[in-house]
Image (spheres, helix red, strand yellow):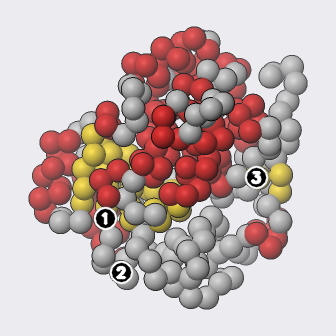
Amino acid sequence: WPSSRPVGPTAVPPSAKMDGTRYTGEFGGRVDVLQVVRVVDCVVAANVLLVHQHRRAKDFLHVIVTPDTQRCAILAQKWRHVRCCSDASVLSNVTLDGVAQLLAAVGPQAAAKGAPWYLQQMLKLGAVAHGVQGLGTHVRIMDGETLMVQPADWFTGSGVEIFDTCDPKGRDHRQIGDGWNHERYGALYYRLTGLPPAGSPVLVAHGMSMTRQHARSLLDAFSPPGETWRSDMWVAHSLSRLCDAAAETGFSEYYYYSS
């Protein structure tokens, strides 16, 4: 890269596509919510309220990973299902400064993109894998500045992740992949796994359903030989294999997990 492109995206076969119109049955297990945010602001507080209103099952945890633990604690006082987790406690020996140093070693574009963008994605994967603050086996990740505006099913009745909940009209006419972004996402994934990412225009949609088992499997694949997800060495191992020319969008927790 950039003299040679990674293997192109693989189209998702029709049988693997799922949305709210193609299955019946509601998942009976607990589904927790995870958000990784820098600041616990009014948008995060509003989303806690909206998720609670729109979820049919009320027995779930809403875990917030943040350095803003003081304001998170205030929110947790209002909502007994909210749990706060310091961002520094999710991954072993992984810090913002440490990620910045790894990116600086990759090159100027990686350094310019910045450690916060990379670290927040890795915190999501790590939080699910480690089950921080009691996160269960089935988790819905929601980006920080998002709101749940209507009810939605995140898992099938058998507990399988739902990746595509968009309007099925016109789906077959949408282009597979995400252009240059997708190829840049795919560069690191191919380096780490030897496989191309699954192509879909709806996998990066500010949220994703994940299971602990699949998150751990992904991080095992990203770990150096002889290590597993438990060591958290997958963070440095992944960042050290970034290509600077692709570093502007060089990592995607959602593309990688769904692939």
Q: Establish if 225 lies above or below 2.
A: below
In the image, 146: left or right of 238? left
| Residue drawn at the location 50% of the way across and 81% of the way down | 27
Q: Name the mark on residue 57.
A: 2
Identify residue for label 1. 61
User: How far, Cα to Cα, is label 1 from label 3?
Assistant: 30 Å
Q: Name the mark on residue 198.
A: 3
Question: What is the x, y in percent for residue 156?
Answer: 58, 78
User: How far, Cα to Cα, is label 3 from label 2?
Assistant: 31 Å
- Viewer can see residue 43: no
| Residue drawn at the location 46% of the way across and 83% of the way down | 28
- Which secondary structure lies at badge 2? loop
Q: Amino acid at mark 3?
A: Ala
For the residue pair 147 and 111, the one nearer the viewer reads as 111
Q: Quadrant of the N terminus?
A: top right
- Residue 134 appears in which quarter of the rendering? bottom left
Q: Give neighbour class at mark 3: few <14, some 14-19, many 20+ (Cα, 10 Å).
A: many
Question: What is the x, y in percent for residue 164?
Answer: 64, 67
Q: Are marks 2 and 1 in contact (CB under 8 Å)?
A: no
- Which secondary structure lies at badge 1? loop
For the residue pair 60 and 231, the one nearer the viewer reads as 231
Q: Amino acid at mark 1?
A: Leu
User: How far, Cα to Cα, is label 2 from label 1?
Assistant: 11 Å
Question: What is the x, y in percent for residue 121?
Answer: 50, 40
Disc nearer the start of the sequence (1/3): 1
